[in-house]
Image: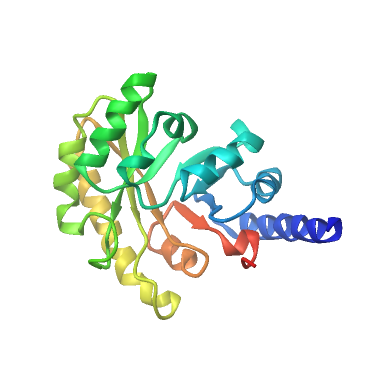
Amino acid sequence: MNYNHDMTSQLIRQNVARLLSELPGGVEVVAAAKRRTPAEVLEAVQAGIQIIGENYVREAKEAHELVGKRAKWHFIGTLRKHDVRRTALEIFDMMESVDSLEIAREIDEKCAQIGKIMPILIEVNSGREPQKSGALPENTEQIIRAISGLENIKVMGLMTMGPRFGSPEDFRPYFAETRKTFERIKGLKSPDVEMRYLSMGMTDSYQIAIEEGANIIRIGTKIFGERD
């Protein structure tokens, strides 16, 4: 058992070192920790990862108990109203997957109770897939305008997943469209909106995402290895 733990720790350390050495300046890595143990998350942080991305509030709480403030915490999963709880908002430093005024209002209300301004990214459904969450590209500006007036939220950019099919190159048009949306909204120079971050790309597509302007990438398998 200790042998397996040591092998996993070594793998994570090697993977993080390799990934960070390959990235251009200005690109931040979010370690996508879905279904990973708190010990694995801690190992990634000790290896140099500065941001942990969690899909589930329960898993975030468990990992946060071990890792704490040694890393920043981003919520990267599908965001539902029941996820917007006071304890969750105390953990997370950014919510990357806000896709509606309704969810934004819920975050704003709960953050007001704890005296916190929450940075958020608007999730864009760049593939226009009806089964997926996210604002349609053509509706993104309207949603941001509606959200921007909320006092306890700060719009900081966009996030997209892109359809999961084909080769990494197949992601390019979806990333490119999201970048165009990002630049258009940034050009509006809205006083309550700071378009700083463009979160795109995962293990199989992050290189294409960076070429298309991503400055946040969300990496799971390339850090932690394949799930059992």
At horizontal 43% and vertical 50% (from top left) the residue drawn is 76
Measured from the top left, where is residue 70 in percent x and y? 63, 34
Say if 166 sits above or below 86 in the image: below
Q: Is residue 26 visible?
A: no
Quick one: 76 or 181, which is closer to the camera? Answer: 76
Measured from the top left, where is residue 5 in percent x and y? 79, 56
At horizontal 21% and vertical 40% (from top left) the residue drawn is 102
Image quadrant where one finds the C terminus: bottom right
Say if 56 sits above or below 88 in the image: below
At horizontal 47% and vertical 55% (from top left) the residue drawn is 217
Left or right of residue 86, residue 50 in this image: right
Measured from the top left, where is residue 65 in percent x and y? 62, 34
At horizontal 34% and vertical 41% (from top left) the residue drawn is 82
Left or right of residue 68, residue 174 in this image: left
Q: Is residue 221 visible?
A: yes
Residue farthest along the right direction in this orientation: 3
